[in-house]
Amino acid sequence: MAVRVGVLGATGAVGQRLIQLLDPHPEFELAALTASDSSAGKTYRQAAKWRVDSPIPSDVAEMTVQATEPDAIPDDIDLLFSSLPSSVGAAVEPGFCEAGYVVSSNSSNGRMDDDVPLVIPEINAEHLDLLEVQRDERGWDGALIKNPNCSTITFVPTLAALTEFGLEKVHVSTLQAVSGAGYDGVTSMEIIDNAIPYIGSEEDKLETESRKLLGEFDGASLTHNDMAVSASCNRIPTIDGHLENVWVETEDELDAAAAAEAMEAFPSLDLHSSPEPLIHVFDEPDRPQPRMDRTVGGGMAIAAGGMQETPFGLQYNCLAHNTIRGAAGASVLNGELLAENGYF
Ligand SMILES: NC(=O)c1ccc[n+]([C@@H]2O[C@H](COP(=O)([O-])OP(=O)(O)OC[C@H]3O[C@@H](n4cnc5c(N)ncnc54)[C@H](OP(=O)(O)O)[C@@H]3O)[C@@H](O)[C@H]2O)c1
């Protein structure tokens, strides 16, 4: 039987991707949509300025957008995907969890809380068991699980593939697409013919979330990975797909061929939205590129290439689709992991 799901913040950039991914989903049945008070009461077609690269699903178009509050959500919904601005998520997500809903959220609020699992299923599915700690501590019938920031998701799978070499220092420099800022995030006057070497709070997210994701969970608490991570984040005028340049210093010797082999061999999962392979390694030195490679694995794979040894360790490039693998697809995948682990 399908799991009945809803989307909080369904009209935004990530919300629209969620609608696109959920419409044909074999396990999930979309039954509720919410947005801000200015959208509540309208049909989805009226409320959402649809900008995704496939037609708006006709049945979803006629659904009524609800206010973002627990009383507006039918009781028989099991799982809510949240793509609310973080300030709004911080204010309302706990109320949904208290009311018994399981929330799989994109928003950055709570990601670093000790009892909130921050999960990329192929990397750290075992962190899901933190939900038992969370329920004990917060007394919720529901639960809150987070996926990382879109730029964190892009490089952490490649690091996970290299952990066997002993990660010591990581430097990552990002070239991030405008859709990562949301529909109203960056104006055309700011970004056309330009690059912006600052994205508020982004560097801190890459540095802290990566260490949490690659940390060890002992059944009661999580110890963050002790590698040093330094990030520098840049906005560039691409629409979708975050490209990142990474330098990794490892305890054991790591050459370009061994890195490529480890990334290619890194296992995926048998979940509906997990791509096979998880990391697609290009031989061509000028790949991956956002326009050409952001849809590898249906937008759920990580693309990597350009491995080379440097005085600063192994250098390579990686890329992921920021609103699919980096946001909507990541939340859906976490929903699939929850379903597989009997949460509904
Ligand atoms: N874009 C990305 O690549 C990306 C990647 C990873 C994570 N995220 C995170 O995902 C979240 C959503 O990002 P986005 O890019 O989709 O943002 P967005 O395009 O600005 O969409 C925000 C959504 O939240 C709704 N909303 C705004 N204020 C609200 C309020 N006070 N109460 C209820 N609903 C409200 C909006 O509804 P209205 O249409 O009615 O205003 C809209 O549905 C953010 O936390 C962001 O940091 C984004």
Image: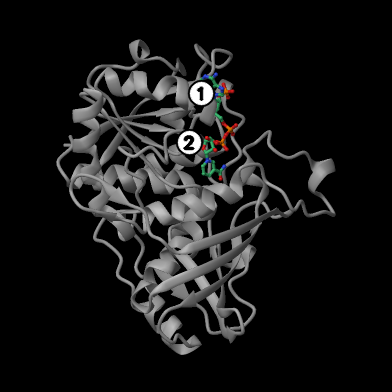
| Position in image of residue 25 (x %, y %) | 32, 44
Q: Is residue 2 visible?
A: no
Write the residue at 28% across / 19% down.
Answer: 98
| Position in image of residue 34 (x %, y %) | 45, 21
Write the residue at 44% across / 87% down.
Answer: 253
Quarter the N terminus occupies: top left
Q: Locate residue 259: give its quadrant.
A: bottom left
The image quadrant where one finds ligand 1 is: top right
The residue closer to the viewer here, 185 or 48, is: 185
Which residue in the protein does label 1 denote? 88
Figure label count: 2
Q: Secondary structure at mark 1?
A: helix
Characterize the local packing of mark 1: few (<14), some (14-19) or many (20 or more) Cα atoms within 10 angstroms. some
Mark 1 CB near ligand 1 (8 Å cut): yes
Q: Are marks 2 and 1 in contact (CB under 8 Å)?
A: yes
Write the residue at 57% across / 27% down.
Answer: 48
Instruction: Decide if residue 215 is on the left or right side of residue 149.
Output: left
Q: Secondary structure at mark 2?
A: loop
Write the residue at 44% across / 64% down.
Answer: 227
Which residue in the protein does label 2 denote? 107
Q: Amino acid at mark 1?
A: Val
Mark 2 CB near ligand 1 (8 Å cut): yes
Instruction: Decide if residue 96 is on the left or right side of residue 137.
Output: right
